[in-house]
Image (cartoon, coloured by chain):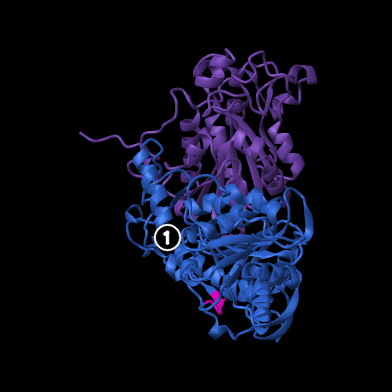
Chain colours: A purple, B blue
Amino acid sequence: MSTAVHPMAKYLRPGKELTTACPGCGDGQIAHSILRAIDQLELDIDDFVFVCGIGCAGWIPSPYFAADTLHTTHGRPIAFATGVVLAAPDRRVMVVSGDGDLTAIGGNHLIHAARRNLDMTVICVNNRIYGMTGGQVAPTTPQGVRTVTTPNGNPEGSFDLCKLAEAAGATYVARWTTAHLRQITRAVIQAMQHQGFSFIEILSQCPVQYGKLSREGGAVATLDHFRDNSVTLRRAENLTPEELEGRWLVGELVAPTSELVSPPTSEVADASTDDGGES
Amino acid sequence: MPETAAVIPGRFFMQGNEACAEGALAAGCRFFAGYPITPATEIAERMAQRLPDVEGVFIQMEDEISSMAAIIGAAWTGALSMTATSGPGISLMLENIGYAVGTETPCVVVDVQRGGPTTGIPAVPSQGDMVQVRRGSHGDYEAIAFAPCSAQEMFDLTVLAFNTAERLRTPVFIMADAAIGHMREPVVIPPETEIPRVHRTLPETGGDPFAIQGFLSEDVAPMPIFGNGFKSHVTGSCHDGYGMRNVVDATALDHFVRTLTNKITKHRDSLMHMESESTDDAEVLLLGYGLVGRAALAISRQARSEGLPVGCVRPITVWPFADAEIRALCGKARRVLVMENNLGQMLPYVQAALAGITTAEPLPPRILGSLHHPDHVLEAIREVLS
């Protein structure tokens, strides 16, 4: 009898097969999508330095990816990564962290690294809440949503992270959700091949904190919500601003024209209609 | 000699901050990240000018938090790295300084101290950050700090700071002040061959990366720097000798904290540098560090020339604290006057070292931020002797 081995297991640190992620968390899907991008490009994981901050998403590469990993202080992974990429330009530097880490406490480093157009890939896992600390409001929590620190609903507006990165000077910007795993892999491939600062926002479900507090529901409900409320650039062209209100524009939002790859027609349909997921 | 070599041997009339930058370059520093702040900015300016010529990297970051982060990131690629700032910048760096301690990252942090608290007066010298660098980051840890008293020592001690950081894999502070930073004096830079250089130990390449114990050895573990297939896991979380996180077991935390601390205390004797004069028969000892220590020495000599039994002790290593050395040198004195350009930051440590042996009293300058006036100190000496 043969033993089934996960095709991405070769990239994992031995003995670290069990994660601490909550049931239904999107971290595992995202880890898989990142590793698949590395695998598809046939890159050597030893050429990478993964840099992450504090929060659930920081645990995507740390300690699971069997590669050089710098798990930093809260909010600062991009600042640490700046030192790595400048001192060792031959390294492939990938920052994987959460929305609170990268855009609240670490927002200053995000905009300045984007402005400098440093050659790194930043993957921002946006679960719209502080998950690890128990469900507090984040700069990405939609207005009105109930969290443990906004018991009467979030009175503040939220960041559009991709617009923020673009305005700051990021030269590759993409947004997908955990309902779009193939698209995430494709975006990571594009970002890794892009010379300069790449920013990928991945909306991810947090059923244990966000789903419960916002009453959005479990993991599947959020994935459905992501799928139903994501609009690709192509589809958005035919929609009015009113129709786009409250929906996520997904796809490659900023990319040098020379790097844009037209996906086969079937994949366009796949990305723009109902089924963006792994299925 | 054109200023395109890492070491520019010769005799120069040089500012303390410039000498610090030259010391860094001579020691092998090739990465500087910083943020402008008076009175430390000239170090950054010199590094910005000099580093590109020696294949180094200079970057002006968006703040001091990211400056400290960037030098740690650079250190993990194998570079000797440094930042320079003043008190407000140290305040911002402290969390990441603790990260450097916890992850055993060699780097040098120069603090050109200015008058505080808060914005204070940027160009007025002070010794107000002495305890901050020792205790300012959270948790238990040991710090290493040297206090230069001249432009020459800004060069020499910066070299020593890099060598110490490399040897013990930990951040090392240079505790200067606005006066030393901005003062111009003769500085002799020796030929490159005469500059001692210590390099961090690295694990052997080509072995099993998961078998490398790159952390938590009191004898300093080899540093699994990035880019060698070591698959290093560097985390500020409590971890074991392999760098693997353990955040559930208090005994792991105990081991983490004690090993990091013991690594420094075990090597404390090799870190001690001190200057002293006429301590054997002195009834009054002046104890000061940095530029104040240099003034203390001058005043002590003046007192001797007037026939007064006075000596001087100038700790060059301010952390770890030279308690045993101070006890040995000061034990016979009737009184130790602790001269600091603050209201008594190292004083409690001196008093603790001398408890039950002799008395140590604070002697700040009449006006904080200015150097001690000799007449003021001599008056204090005569009062003790009368």
Q: Which residues are magenta?
A: B275-279
Question: Residue B380 at x, y = what percent?
Answer: 68, 67
Q: Please, what is the dominant secondary structure of the magenta stretch? A: strand
Q: Nearer the viewer, residue A90 or B181?
A: B181
For residue B120, side relative to residue A123 (left or right): right
List the residue tagged with mark 1.
B265
Is residue A258 visible in the rendered image? The answer is no
Placement of B232 over or under B329, stated as above or below:
above
Residue B78 placement (x, y as % from top left): 51, 63
Quarter where residue B207 is shown = bottom left
* In magenta stretch: residue B262: no
Q: In the image, is residue A243 above or below residue B286? A: above
Residue A174 shown left or right of residue A97 in the figure = right
Q: Is residue B89 left or right of residue B199?
A: right
Figure quadrant of the N terminus of chain A: top left
What chain does badge 1 belong to? Answer: B
Residue A32 x, y percent position in the rendering: 46, 36
Question: Which of these two is toward me, A90 or A4?
Answer: A90
| Left or right relative to B352: residue B219 | left
- Tell me the residue at 59%/54% (across/down): B131
Quadrant of residue B188 within the rendered picture: bottom right
Q: Secondary structure at mark 1?
A: helix
Along the viewing direction, whichever of A95 and A247 lies nearer the viewer = A95
